[in-house]
Amino acid sequence: GDSVTQMEGPVTLSEEAFLTINCTYTATGYPSLFWYVQYPGEGLQLLLKATKADDKGSNKGFEATYRKETTSFHLEKGSVQVSDSAVYFCALSGYGGSQGNLIFGKGTKLSVKP
Amino acid sequence: DVKVTQSSRYLVKRTGEKVFLECVQDMDHENMFWYRQDPGLGLRLIYFSYDVKMKEKGDIPEGYSVSREKKERFSLILESASTNQTSMYLCASTPSQGGNQPQHFGDGTRLSIL
C-alpha cells in the first residue's frame, strides 16, 4: 500500500543553518504531496503542497519539489529561525476510492538554537 | 479561512467512562477525519466520513465509534475508555474534490484516561 517515509529526528540546528528534511513515498497513481507543520500545543497546519511531478511548493522560506523519478519530496529552508522549531510531517493524498485521505510520515522534530 | 474547532483542548476521564470528542467545521466540507497522534507513531486514522450519516473505518477503529448527524459536526466516541486510549486526538476536514485538497486541522484534544 501507499506509504511515506521521512527522516527520523530530532534534528537540532543553529539559527541561520540550512535545513533539509528527507521524505520519500510509495504510491500508486499520481498522488498530491504535502508538508504540514505542528507548533507546540497546536494542531497541524499546511505548510506547502505540490500536485504533480516537478511542481515546487513554497511558503515562509520553505521549499519542496515533487520528484517522481526519485519518489521524493524533501523539505528545505536556506536559513532557519528559532521560530521554525516544530514537528514537520510529510503526507501524500489517497488515490481513487481514498481521495481526500492523507497518509502521513511519522514526523520530524526540529529544534533551532539561537 | 477554514475553522475546525474541537470542543476541548484538555480532557481527563476515568477508565470505563463513555467519552465524546466533538469537532465542528465552518466551511461546508464534505469529508471529515479523526486521527490520534502518539510519539514515534505519527498520525493514525481512526475513522472518516464522506457525508452525513456515512462513516468508514480507518487504520485503528477498535474501541471507537463516530457519529455524523449534521454536515458540520463529526463526533468521536470512546465506548468504554481505557488507559491505552490516552493520546492527542486531531480532527480534520477537506472538501469533496479529493486528492489535491489539503486537510484542515483543529488544535487537538489531549485526552488522559486515568
Image (tube, coloured by chain):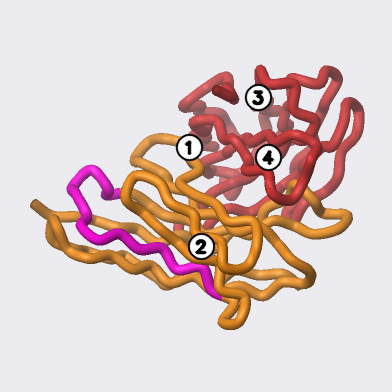
Chain colours: A orange, B red
Q: Residues within 10 Å of mark 2 (few under 14, many from 20)?
A: many
Q: Is residue A92 magenta?
A: no
Query: Residues under labels 2 and 4: Cα distance?
Result: 16 Å
Query: Residues under labels 1 and 3: Cα distance?
Result: 13 Å
- Among numbered discs 2 and 1, the one appearing first in the sequence: 1
Query: Residues under labels 3 and 4: Cα distance?
Result: 9 Å
Instruction: Tell me where residue A44 appears, x and y as whole percent.
Output: 49, 41
Q: Amino acid at mark 1?
A: Gly
Q: Secondary structure at mark 1?
A: loop
- Pick the residue in front: B113 or A55: A55
Q: Residues within 10 Å of mark 3 (few under 14, many from 20)?
A: many
The residue that disc 2 covers is A106
- Disc 4 sits on a residue from what chain? B
Q: Are marks 3 and 2 on the same chain?
A: no
Mark 1 and mark 3 in contact? Answer it, CB < 8 Å.
no
Mark 1 and mark 4 in contact? Answer it, CB < 8 Å.
no
- Residue located 59% across and 24% down the image: B2
- Disc 1 sits on a residue from what chain? A
The residue that disc 1 covers is A43
Any part of residue A15 in sight: yes
The residue that disc 3 covers is B23
Q: Amino acid at mark 2?
A: Lys
- Among numbered discs 3 and 4, the one appearing first in the sequence: 3
Q: Residues within 10 Å of mark 4 (few under 14, many from 20)?
A: many
> Residue B34, which numbered label?
4
